[in-house]
Amino acid sequence: MGREYEPVKGKWYRDLEEDESFQVLSVDEDQELVELQHVDGDVEEIDLDTWAELDLEPTDEPEGWSGSEDDDDEDDDWDEEDDEDDDWDEDEDDDEDEEEEERGDY
């Protein structure tokens, strides 16, 4: 019989019997389905009865994990840098517009 851990979206668990870690992507209580993503990227759905049979323990996200669609921190950093560059370009354009207005060049 498995340990009694409720599936929580975004949390990581280790299946002690299979010695595999996975993340819960979603929990649909109406359809009694849990969507999992394994470390190798494979995604599967299991029903809540199957979940209850698993011998699980909560675990930490694996080091270097980058497979989750919801967890794209690196992409967010890139966008912020990109936005900063855009702001700089806009400021430069504003300065040029002001100079043109001062000279009367519309």
Image: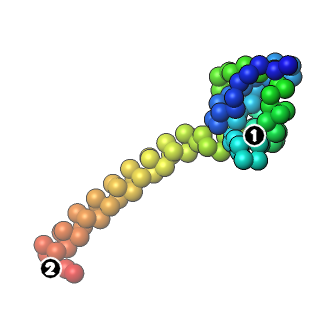
Q: From this viewpoint, is residue 90 visible?
A: yes
- In this picture, is 72 found above or below 64? below
- In the image, which disc is placed on residue 104? 2
Identify which residue, 25 or 29, lies in the foreground: 29
Disc 2 secondary structure class: loop
- In this picture, is 91 found above or below 77? below
| Amino acid at dot 1 | Val
Q: Is residue 84 left or right of residue 46?
A: left
- In the image, which disc is placed on residue 2? none
Identify which residue, 19 or 101, lies in the foreground: 19
Q: Quadrant of the N terminus?
A: top right
When asked about the image quadrant of residue 8, the answer is top right
How is this picture coloured? rainbow
Q: From this viewpoint, is residue 65 visible?
A: no
Q: Is residue 34 left or right of residue 18?
A: left
Identify which residue, 47 or 69, lies in the foreground: 47
> What residue is pinned by disc 1?
34
When asked about the image quadrant of residue 100, the answer is bottom left
As measured in the structure, the alpha-carbon distance from the residue carrying label 2 to the one carrying label 1 is 66 Å
Counting from the top left corner in percent of width and height, residue 103 is at 14, 75
| Amino acid at dot 2 | Gly
Identify which residue, 45 or 6, lies in the foreground: 6
- Could you tell which of marks 2 and 1 lies nearer the N-terminus? 1
Disc 1 residue crowd, few under 14, some 14–19, many 20+, Cα 10 Å: many
